[in-house]
Image (spheres, helix red, strand yellow):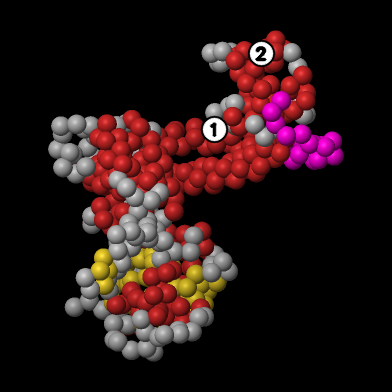
């Protein structure tokens, strides 16, 4: 018969508050102490736990921590890999903070909120059972995750800065958006910078504007003269600004354009690093049409060990691609929302991948079209979310079996 020790750790940026419980269902803690959240602190935690193991002959230790981003990462890695506690059966569990919050509410309607109490509830949750898959650490995956999350951050920054640029662009040349499909292309940004006003753009000769477009577009336009005429037409039909207002708008746009170019350059650099890193990790996700190295990396880095998920339903819930249930008696709501919890990085990469796959793969294209044709609100968003949920099943199967994707006629048809 094993003698377990349950250790709850409330992690903060500076300190880790520790509470130790035995398997006896009592509220009194066996031991409480606080250590610094750094390397000397984690070594002190090891020493204190080893003293308890020697004193009480524990042969199993279960550590529980809330997943608090970077603050809990080092502690979890050291507990899992680097520290020796004198017994072979040591497991580490990382909990979503919302799960601990709900566990506290199940005991008290208005539970107190402090580090000592939180550490006790984390230890009690570990003792109660119904635990997630134990924490596992893969250096290649965590390194890849740093890169894919950096790309996510840069993409969000690019969207935010681009939206702000568009507000100023509308003030400067309200009909400009009717010309370029990609407003952030090198040629488009060059036009925004070169011409200080709509008058300057409207008055330049067509030949000079065509030469400008060819130079900055690297001769990629099929009909640069037509583009030049559309630009001048947009300039003539746009609203006019006073000089003082125009100067302010130009300065704001110049600042945004510099930021956008910097972000675009960094995204290219991160993309190259992601592609190089992915080559060292065996995987088959990129065999799916529309899923390249970037989407494969983002999905893999956030899933980690696929064996921690018993089914594709668990994986979908982890990604936040699952729907709330609204049912009472004979009533069942026809429209429900996506759950608010879940890994936002994994949800982002799955949704982006689904949007790409539905363009390149006929099976997903047919499914997306079918769902979009259904008479529901937010047709595209709903159809894309459902397509992403379908993709989760495929991702789960490919990672579990390590097989290549078979678009049609294979044994994956039943899974899709």
User: What residue is pinned by disc 1?
Assistant: 268
Task: Give the mark, 1 or 2, whose residue is nearer the N terminus.
Answer: 2
Residue drawn at x 16%, y 42% is 414
Is residue 11 something that shows in the picture? yes
Q: Is residue 385 visible?
A: no
Outermost residue to the right: 244
Q: Residues within 10 Å of mark 1 (few under 14, many from 20)?
A: few
Figure check: 51 above or below 233: below
Q: Nearer the viewer, residue 333 or 289?
A: 333
Q: Which residues are magenta?
A: 236-256
Q: Is residue 241 magenta?
A: yes
In the rendered image, the quadrant that contains the C terminus is: top left
Q: Is residue 63 above or below residue 225?
A: below
Magenta-span inclusion, residue 319: no
The reply, left or right, for residue 21 in relation to residue 394 is: right
Quadrant in which residue 363 is drawn:
top left
Q: Which mark is residue 301?
A: none
Image coordinates for residue 63, horizontal then vertical, percent: 37, 70
From what the image shows, is residue 279 above or below residue 107?
Answer: above
Q: Which is closer to the viewer, label 1 or label 2?
A: 2
As helix, strand or loop, the secondary structure at mark 1 comes to: helix
Residue 162, how many percent across, how many down?
61, 40
The numbered disc on residue 210 is 2
User: CA gap, disc 1 to disc 2?
Assistant: 29 Å
* Residue at point 44%, 53% (across, down): 344
Residue 108 relative to residue 398: left or right? right
Q: Where on the picture, by quarter, is residue 189? A: top right
In the foreground, 165 or 197: 197
> Going 30% across and 38% down the picture, which residue do you hit?
369
């Amino acid at each position: 018969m094993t003698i377990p020790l349950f250790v709850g750790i409330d992690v903060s940026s500076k300190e880790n508050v520790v509470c130790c419980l035995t398997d006896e269902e009592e509220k009194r803690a066996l031991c409480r102490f606080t250590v610094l959240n750094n390397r000397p602190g984690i070594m002190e935690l090891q020493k204190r736990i080893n003293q308890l193991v020697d004193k009480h002959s524990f042969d199993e230790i279960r550590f529980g921590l809330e997943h608090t981003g970077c603050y809990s990462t080092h502690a979890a890695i050291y507990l899992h890999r680097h520290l020796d506690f004198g017994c072979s059966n040591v497991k580490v569990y990382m909990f979503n903070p919302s799960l601990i919050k709900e566990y506290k509410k199940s005991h008290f309607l208005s539970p107190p909120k402090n580090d000592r109490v939180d550490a006790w509830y984390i230890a009690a949750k570990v003792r109660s059972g119904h635990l997630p898959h134990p924490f596992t650490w893969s250096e290649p995956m965590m390194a890849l995750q740093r890169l894919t999350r950096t790309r996510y951050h840069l993409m969000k920054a690019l969207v935010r800065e681009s939206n702000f640029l568009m507000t100023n662009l509308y003030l400067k040349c309200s009909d400009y958006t009717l010309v370029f499909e990609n407003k952030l292309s090198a040629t488009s940004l060059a036009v925004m910078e070169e011409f200080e006003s709509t008058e300057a753009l409207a008055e330049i000769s067509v030949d000079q504007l065509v030469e400008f477009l060819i130079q900055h577009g690297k001769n990629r336009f099929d009909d640069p003269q037509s583009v030049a005429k559309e630009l001048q037409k947009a300039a003539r039909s746009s609203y006019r600004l006073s000089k003082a207002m125009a100067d302010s708008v130009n300065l704001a746009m110049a600042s945004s354009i510099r930021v956008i170019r910097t972000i675009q350059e960094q995204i290219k650099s991160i993309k190259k690093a992601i592609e190089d890193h992915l080559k060292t990790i065996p995987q088959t996700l990129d065999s799916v049409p529309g899923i390249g190295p970037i989407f494969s990396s983002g999905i893999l880095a956030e899933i980690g060990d696929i064996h921690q998920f018993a089914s594709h339903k668990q994986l979908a819930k982890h990604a936040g691609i699952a729907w709330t249930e609204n049912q009472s008696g004979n009533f069942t709501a026809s429209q429900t929302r996506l759950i608010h919890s879940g890994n936002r990085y994994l949800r982002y990469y799955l949704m982006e991948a689904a949007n790409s796959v539905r363009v390149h793969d006929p099976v997903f294209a047919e499914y997306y079209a079918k769902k979009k044709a259904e008479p529901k609100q937010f047709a595209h968003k709903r159809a894309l979310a459902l397509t992403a949920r379908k993709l989760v099943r495929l991702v789960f199967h490919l990672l579990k079996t390590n097989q290549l994707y078979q678009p049609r006629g294979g044994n994956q048809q039943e899974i899709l």
